[in-house]
Image: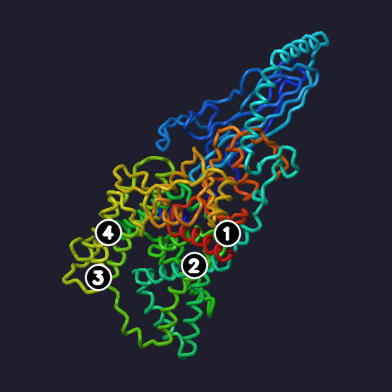
Amino acid sequence: MKKLVWIIGLLLMPITIFAQESVTWSYKLTGNNTDSPSIEMTAHISQGFHLYSMDNPEGGSNPLTFYFETNGCKLDGNPVPNKSYHKEYDEIFELDQHTYDGEVTFTQKIKPTEANYSIEVEIKGQACNDVGCTQVFGSHKFEGSAPIKASKAEDIKEEKTETIKETEAEKIHEEAIELTQMTDSVQGSESWMTPEANLSGITAHHNWWANVEAEMMVFSHDPEQQSRSLWYIFIAGFVGGLIALVTPCVWPMIPMTVSFFLKQNKTKKKSLASAGIYGLSIIVIYVALGIIVTVLFGASALNELATSAGFNIAFFILLVIFAISFMGGFELTLPSSWTNKMDSKVDSTSGYVSIFFMAFTLALVSFSCTGPIIGTLLVEAAATSNFVSPAVGMGGFALALALPFSIFAMFPTMLKAVPKSGGWMNTVKVVLGFLELALALKFLSVADLAYGWRVLDREVFVSLWIVIFALLGFYLLGKLTFPHDDKVEKVGLFRFCLAVISLSFAVYMLPGLWGAPLKSISAFTPPLSTQDFNLFDGEVKAQVEDYDEGLQIGKELNKPVLLDFSGFGCVNCRKMEAAVWTNPEVKQMLDNDFVLVTLMVDDKTPLPEPVKVTEKDGQIRTLRTYGDKWSYLQRSKFGANAQPFYVIVNDEGKPMTSSYSYKEDVPAYLHFLNSGLNHYKKQK
């Protein structure tokens, strides 16, 4: 059991780091100075990601594509991978998807036609993990030489000349068609692309395509928004501390510790100082825990970790174990050597140092009750992406835990009014056990959606919550008992009120079995798209699918523009549309207050003319499709590459608030919409 507790303690300290890049490429030219050279392009796929293959079925995610420009050589066949892809059925797209993970090398054979040759390769594709999808890019130029004889070179030259003559008429015809298409697309509006332009190959009307990352940073560090999130975390921590107070691990310690201070110190002034130092030590210990977690892992890594499938499964198991323990299944305690060591420190030291070790002993002894509360609080704090949130949350938790020791030391007579330890404390543990089970299902749901198991569909999730909260209501009424419970002779008023609330909540969730939105718990339940029987009808559709056209409409209607960077192969985009956009309040705002522009970054519709652009890293890439165009817009203007990605702009393309990524949280999305709308109105 000690080993189990040790593992559980480690699980509270997440250590997985979210990969910064989904796929990186390395390149190699083999067989140089021979008649049959080849080029190798190796994809290094980050852990947790999968790269879609070249022949991924149509209708699925974006397949891998290689573009070659040859000079003095020609291609011999197509790129060949060094291993087979994985085939797995995707229920979202209802087809088999072909993916690679780890590392895969693609080899392209070439035939030199001149003594010196070069070949440029450009790679485009899509990689996804449990959080979202990113567009994959790669480019490289190979240069080599081959033992081409003069006579052979002349033969090849004549062959090339004949080929040019045969295709010249066809080429002229195709160019005429492309020119006509370009003219048609430009008439009546300014063209977004000018191949000869100096600004990355693009000239944008009214600087609509200009980079706005600096403006986005201003909103990301909005003091009002940060203050609001920090206050939320602090209050959540304080409430968690109050809950921890009434658990059997902490409550009995209050009168014992205060009595110890009063007996040890003969003057009231010294007793107050000792109790104050004790309370301050508790705060320092828990705040230090929050700081250590943030420093070790970083706020951004914790945020990504909070949405990863592996972590959510681990936390689900952890909460179920704690729930079983709270309900009397077994007792969880830290290794006795830890508490014994702290006790020895208390005995061997004196003064304020001894008091600090007493506080540390309290933290260790109360672990079995405070552990799940602290773990859940750290996950909630990490999801805010604020560097100080874990420390602030732990500060609120520790303050609530420390207050009674200081207050009762100041007014010792109040100790007589404190309820004695008894059966009611076990009731608190069992109630916490029910809540742990309900919360554990939320974490399992995240993993279930990520892996596509379809074990915990929405109706299954809601059914389990209905059962859990109904059983909690019956337990509070004394109709259900557990091993360590005292017999309930009569139900008190407070306990009766809690039972009514729990049973009413179970009844409130019943319509969710037929597709009711259940707005109050929509951030916890799986998306509506996972429900087989759904009577709810509330689909949101984009008003336009072109960026420049969307800004023009926004100007005419005097409305902000909501840019939705999405993809046909983006699973999490579909989840957001099903779980968040279908919310009535969100739908009403999207339909009436914004111009919704959906930009598919994997749209294969070809552009009237390919355009070469220069990326921030100096690499030159060619935009061939509308998907390339929107993907370049997202990278160059907003400095982002993952989907889904939402940003609100005015009719000049300037951001009105911080961006929003994948998070199935209706209140958070409503705050995002209201923040952008309010800034837009203030600007006007």
Quadrant placement of the C terminus: bottom right
Where is mark 1, residue-wise?
656
Q: Is residue 641 left or right of residue 71?
A: left
Return the disc, 1 or 4, that comes first in the chain's sequence: 4
- Which of the two marks, 1 or 4, is nearer to us in this view? 1
Residue 497 - label: 3
- x and y percentages locating residue 589 in the rendered image: 45, 57
Where is mark 4, residue-wise?
508
* Marks 3,4: beta carbons within 8 A: no
- Which of the two marks, 2 or 3, is nearer to us in this view? 3
Structure colour scheme: rainbow
- CA gap, disc 4 to disc 2? 33 Å
- Which of the two marks, 3 or 4, is nearer to us in this view? 4
Q: Secondary structure at mark 3?
A: helix
- Which of the two marks, 1 or 2, is nearer to us in this view? 1
Q: Secondary structure at mark 2?
A: helix
Q: Farthest residue in the bottom direction?
A: 267
Residue 249 - label: none
* Marks 2,3: beta carbons within 8 A: no
| Viewer-proximal residue among 558 and 673 | 558
Residue type of the residue flagged with mark 1: Met
Residue type of the residue flagged with mark 4: Tyr
Query: Local crowd at mark 3 within 10 Å, few (<14), some, or many (≥20)?
Result: some
| Viewer-proximal residue among 171 and 568 | 171
Residue type of the residue flagged with mark 2: Met
| Viewer-proximal residue among 601 and 454 | 601
Return the disc, 4 or 2, that comes first in the chain's sequence: 2
Where is mark 2, residue-wise?
394
